[in-house]
């Protein structure tokens, strides 16, 4: 397993989510299995920062479009083209880089849920994510600007503690789609910016988008000892051809910030150097731990303050130890 190479597969789905994030108190209840995008045409113009963010989340699911974009990050400036479609209720996002190494990434998905079912239905992302992040971030509108030759409203999302990074979004006044996004570190400095230069033919999907069915949580042999407030395990499919069957990958999110956890027996993988590693705007913590007599490699990776990733990695324990 080379976890660091998987950064591209982690980044691009998030990059696609920057333009098509995953939520407005519309009638998408946990019992529904589909959301009708045409309901967006009946909603009044958002008035508050939270209203705009909710519209942004719905728009990311419901608009079909093509776009040209630029990413300014640790590796300089890269240009790409992006598309988002909805077919038979399933979303398909595609990103193709136009310079540097030839790379194409695709994501097929449904509207997700905020957690595992745990014996019942888990709330959908569109029904709960805006309320969830309001507990850990301050949302505020900062005026009108022009991005990609379109009117945009700037939305500042500032963390209420030191456990997560902030973001700044520029939302299209007509559709609510993200036209520009900056990731802000603890000092408020933009460490990475993603921006559309052209948004072509945005059109509302005249139909429904599927909502993912509730999923039962897997049984892991280890236990997370500490998580920042608001973070919870995400019910997403994390199997990958890049990782062997003995590698466990779990995803954790507070609705805005996300990190990955990998656990693998050391005898089955190529070990990585223990310690803290910088991966562009992300960090990765590598630990070699003995879990119930089995030497394992633990990797915690994400766009998070390093001390948070270190604490998560060091708090991992074998489930049997807790009992």
Image (cartoon, helix red, strand yellow):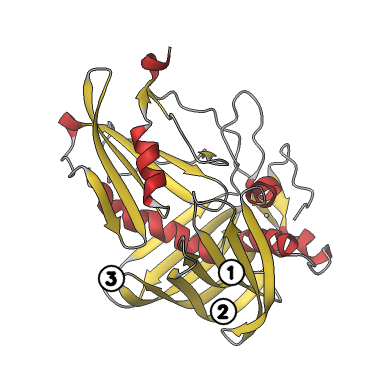
Q: Nearer the viewer, mark 2 or mark 1?
A: 1
Q: Nearer the viewer, mark 1 or mark 3?
A: 1
Mark 2 secondary-structure assignment: strand
Front-most of 163 and 251?
Answer: 163
Crowding at mark 3 (Cα within 10 Å: few <14, some 14-19, many 20+): few
The C terminus appears in which quarter of the rendering? top left
Sequence-wise, which precedes: disc 2 or disc 1? 1
Mark 1 secondary-structure assignment: strand
Sequence-wise, which precedes: disc 1 or disc 3? 3
Image position of 91 (left or right of 175): left
Image position of 177 (left or right of 2): right
Image position of 97 (left or right of 123): left
Q: CA distance from mark 3 to mark 2?
A: 22 Å
Image location (x, y in percent) of residue 22 = 59, 55
Q: Which numbered tag is attached to residue 275?
A: none
Mark 1 in CB contact with mark 3 (< 8 angstroms): no
Q: CA distance from mark 1 to mark 3?
A: 28 Å
Mark 3 — residue? 102
The N terminus appears in which quarter of the rendering? top left
Q: Residue furthest top?
A: 323
Image location (x, y in percent) of residue 85 = 56, 64
Crowding at mark 1 (Cα within 10 Å: few <14, some 14-19, many 20+): many
Which residue does the image show at 27% across and 31% down from the upper left?
Answer: 246
Quadrant position of residue 281: bottom left
Q: Please say if 108 is above or below 323.
A: below
Front-most of 15 and 87?
Answer: 15
Q: Which numbered tag is attached to residue 169?
A: 1
Quadrant position of residue 63: bottom right
Q: Is residue 130 visible?
A: yes
Mark 2 — residue? 199
Sequence-wise, which precedes: disc 3 or disc 2? 3
């Amino acid at each position: 397993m080379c976890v660091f190479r998987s950064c591209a597969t982690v980044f691009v789905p998030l990059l696609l989510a920057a333009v098509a994030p995953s939520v407005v108190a519309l009638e998408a209840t946990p019992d529904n299995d589909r959301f009708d995008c045409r309901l967006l045409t009946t909603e009044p113009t958002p008035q508050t920062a939270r209203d705009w963010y909710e519209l942004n989340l719905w728009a990311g699911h419901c608009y079909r479009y093509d776009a040209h974009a630029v990413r300014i990050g640790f590796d300089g400036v890269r240009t790409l083209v992006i598309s988002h479609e909805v077919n038979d209720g399933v979303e398909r996002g595609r990103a193709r880089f136009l310079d540097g190494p030839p790379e194409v990434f695709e994501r097929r998905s449904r509207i997700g849920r905020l957690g595992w079912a745990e014996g019942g239905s888990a709330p959908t992302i569109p029904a709960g994510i805006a309320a969830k992040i309001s507990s850990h971030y301050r949302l505020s509108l900062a005026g009108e600007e022009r991005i990609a030759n379109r009117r945009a409203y700037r939305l500042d999302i500032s963390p209420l503690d030191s456990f997560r990074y902030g973001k700044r979004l520029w939302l299209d006044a007509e559709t609510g789609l993200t036209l520009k996004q900056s990731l802000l570190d603890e000092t408020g400095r933009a460490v990475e910016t993603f921006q559309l230069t052209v948004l072509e033919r945005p059109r509302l999907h005249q139909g429904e988008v599927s909502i993912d069915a509730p999923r039962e949580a897997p049984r892991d042999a280890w236990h997370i000892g500490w998580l920042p407030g608001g973070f919870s395990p995400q019910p997403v499919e994390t199997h990958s051809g890049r990782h062997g069957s003995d590698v466990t990958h779990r995803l954790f999110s507070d609705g805005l910030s996300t990190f990955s956890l990998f656990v693998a027996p050391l005898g089955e993988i190529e070990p990585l150097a223990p310690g803290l590693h910088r991966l562009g705007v992300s960090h990765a913590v590598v630990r070699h731990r003995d879990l119930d007599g089995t030497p394992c490699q633990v990797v915690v990776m994400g766009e998070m303050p390093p001390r948070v990733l270190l604490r998560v990695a060091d708090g991992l324990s074998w489930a049997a130890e807790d009992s």
